[in-house]
Amino acid sequence: MLRVYNTLSRTKEPFEPVHEGKVGIYLCGPTVYKPSHIGHMVGPVIFDAVKRYLAYSGYDVTLVVNVTDVDDKLIAESQRRGVPMAQLAAEMTTDYMNNLEALGVDAIDHFPRCTETMDEIIEFTRTLIEKGFAYEARGDVYFEVGKCPGYGKLSHRGIEATQGDGGGMAERKRAGADFALWKSAKPDEPSWPSPWGPGRPGWHIECSAMSRKLLGETFDVHGGGLDLMFPHHENEIAQSECCHGRPMARYWMHNGLMQAGSEVGKVGGRHTRAAEGDLASQEIGKISKSKGSEPFRDLLKQFSGETIRFFVLSTHYRRPIDFSEQRLREVETGMDTFHRFFKRFERVMGCNYYNIETPKRINEWDFPRDGHPFLLAVTKRSANFLSCMDDDFNTGGAIGELFELVRLLNKYVDDENLEEPENRTSDNLQKLRIGAKRLRELASTLGLFRNPPQESSGSGDDELTGKLMELLIELRAESRRKKDFATADQIRNRLTEIGVVLEDRPGGTDWSRK
RNA sequence: GGCGCCGUAGCCAAGUGGCUAAGGCAGCGGAUUGCAAAUCCGCCAUCGUGGGUUCGACUCCCACCGGCGCCUCCA
């Protein structure tokens, strides 16, 4: 039974979608005015995994992530750079999409743009005026917070605590807490025609309009970073619920924010065991435009998207996570265990791990329960994995079970001595396949290990390198046969120095980089 | 000041009112190996501090200390 933590109630609640078997998720996406940094990627990675798991659990899931391509920051940046806003937005949207692709985030169904939702936004705004929840003031339209019963129920604030007069427009508002639905355009600003004159949407209204357009008046999950809870989400609720007279979303899920030490941005450098006191003294804080942080695409030069994905999912989504390159390196080391097993699987089975077909839905489990200890252990760990995920998407705990699964698989290969071809039987191969399949199936729900990592493609090295390695390995094998270990070790040591690792196995010697 | 979060081994990180407190990284010992690498086995925590509730708390309550977020169109 899946349980989800709902910010509205501050408790974990049983998950019951509005329409049986279907789930609609809306996630607040980026304002595309600058290249995205790692903080922007946390939400997409988490909700991509949430969707995968829900789909695996049997739901028909629709995931929507909006792209804000009209906004004050966008206008400011386009003026600063002397580039049309639409062009800037297009560039930054491409950057964002590339980053998502690198992370393996491909479960998002719709990316509505603000500029493409203008009719709905205007319509929404007009309805709010008609219903008396909003008022026009010299070309602006404001939502009247005082008219909205229950305002503040998400962030648990009273209206009196929600002052903040924006920038200079306070005198047009009836109350300080009122917020803009529509902003009149200054002469040099991009604008869209409206019943109130040329202007652009306020920050919050697009989400209300888009979510209704794509998911309906009441949908299942609304997600976003913790920092958006107030005022953004609070205002979305006010707009949508006053307009529709019914709940906007059943579950509000807020992810913790990525934090960064002063280390962020320092690429490369020494990474020998960092001195103990070093980390403690670092200033930790939220990643934001003011603190600055490197564009995500630059981080991708150092770490694979999958490493970053693994890193993000290794912590529970509601908790803050500290970014550090050292951490990422450690994650890489951990992931190697999986990648090595996948190669091992291929050696033993003669077929590619990444080609194993896995069930898309949990009810398609086809696990023989014949009481074999290995299979029983695999089943136990698989069940634990599901329990973790069912408990408010505890991806950290689930990943722990994944490690247990690889251990079990490696142990089985060891115990059965499957590196030696003569020990392979259809029975033990079959069991190994079943176990590996389960690992792949579960990891897929987190979006992990779906495709081979870049490095291990083998084709990355040219033909000459391959031939030369073959030669060296052959020479070394010859030396070993003659018990000339000095020469054999010299070859291996020299190769280690240049970043090539040799591994001797029953079937021969393998080499790999790094 | 208001609202809220967090403090589990050297580091990261799950979890739980009583059963061996997951897992990862690092480290140590062992099996394996000509030696390695990889893999496997084993070792490595009384859960910030002080009270309280309870037959029993790391888990619930209170206080304190320490770290952090929002209250500013920052995911």
Image (tube, coloured by chain):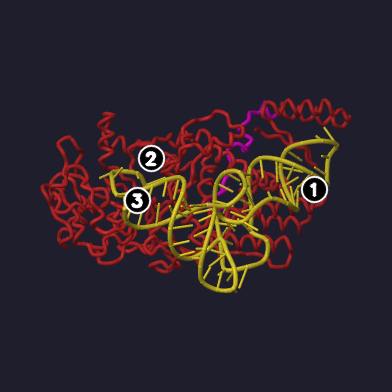
Chain colours: A red, B yellow
| Disc with the residue nearer the chain's start (3 vs 2) | 3
Q: Nearer the viewer, residue A302 or A263?
A: A263
Instruction: Give the label on residue A288, or none.
Output: 2
Q: Which stretch appears magenta?
A: A442-466
Q: Is residue A484 left or right of residue A115?
A: right
Nearest the viewer among A3 and A70 is A3
Residue A17 falls in which quadrant of the image? bottom left
Task: Chain letter for mark 1, please.
Answer: A
Q: Residue furthest left?
A: A138
Tell me where residue A245 sits by quadrant.
bottom left
| Above or below A288: residue A442 | below
**x then y, percent, for residue A304:** 53, 39
Q: What subunit carries mark 2?
A: A
Provide the secondary structure element on which disc 2 rests: loop
Q: Earlier in the sequence, mark 1 or mark 3?
A: 3
Q: Do marks 3 and 2 both belong to one polypeptide chain? A: yes
Q: Report whether A428 appears left or right of A283.
A: right
Give the residue at mark 1. A421
Residue A465 is a magenta residue: yes
Q: Are marks 2 and 1 in contact (CB under 8 Å)?
A: no
Q: Residues within 10 Å of mark 1 (few under 14, many from 20)?
A: few
Residue A89: within the magenta?
A: no
Task: Give the label on residue A228, or none.
Answer: 3
Q: Are marks 1 and 3 on the same chain?
A: yes
Q: From the viewer's side, name the closer residue of A399 and A12.
A: A12
| Disc number for residue A253 | none
Q: Earlier in the sequence, mark 2 or mark 1?
A: 2
Q: Nearer the viewer, mark 1 or mark 3?
A: 3
Task: Report the amino acid beneath label 1.
Answer: Pro
